[in-house]
Amino acid sequence: MLKIGSIVWGVKDIQKEADFWTAALNYEVTYQSIDFAILKPKKGNEGVQMSLKQITSPHARRHHMDLFSDNQKEEVERLLALGATRKKWDYEPDADYVVLEDPDGNPFCVVQK
């Protein structure tokens, strides 16, 4: 049986992304170097480890996360205040998600549970 050990996110700016994702997910940095960081849930919280790997490629990264929320509108506003931006998206009429981008331009979705 397999389980997710870590999500590895390709980013251009390690510090900016670590600041955003630790605040967004209530995580803490447990390791950081010049080109890599490991983020884990703060004590008492559950979640999957997230690793940030510095990249230099200008091409789009083919990854995204779905973040589930009981209050999507509130979470979207909180994430926008932390530095996320809305991604232009062609939503279907019954979409239960909002597509955002982190400060480095990586897309992710906030899904209403």
Image (cartoon, grey):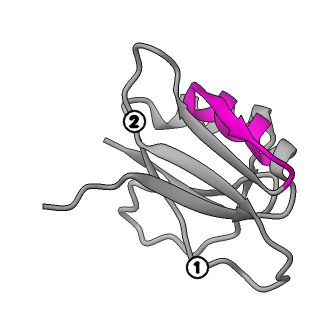
Q: Is residue 25 magenta?
A: yes
- Asked whether the beta carbons under mark 1 and mark 2 sit within 8 Å of each other, the answer is no
Q: Is residue 19 above or below residue 2?
A: above
Observer-nearest of 97 and 28: 28
Observer-nearest of 49 and 60: 49
Q: Secondary structure at mark 2?
A: loop
Q: Quadrant of residue 39?
A: top right
Percent x, y of residue 7: 49, 57
Residue 61 falls left or right of residue 11? left
Extreme residue toward the left, this view: 1
Q: CA distance from mark 1 to mark 2?
A: 22 Å
Q: How many marks?
A: 2
Q: Quadrant of residue 18?
A: top right
Estimate how packed mark 2 is, as few (under 14), some (14 to 19) or many (20 or more) residues with alpha carbons within 10 Å. few
Q: Residue at x 21, y 61 (%)?
A: 2
Residue 48 falls left or right of residue 55? left
Query: Magenta segment, which residues?
Result: 17-34
The residue that disc 1 covers is 62
Q: Is residue 35 magenta?
A: no
Q: Secondary structure at mark 1?
A: loop
Disc number placed over residue 104 in the picture, else none: none
> Can residue 20 be spotted in the picture?
yes
The residue that disc 2 covers is 47
Residue 50 falls left or right of residue 53? left
Observer-nearest of 90 and 62: 62
Residue 79 falls left or right of residue 47? right
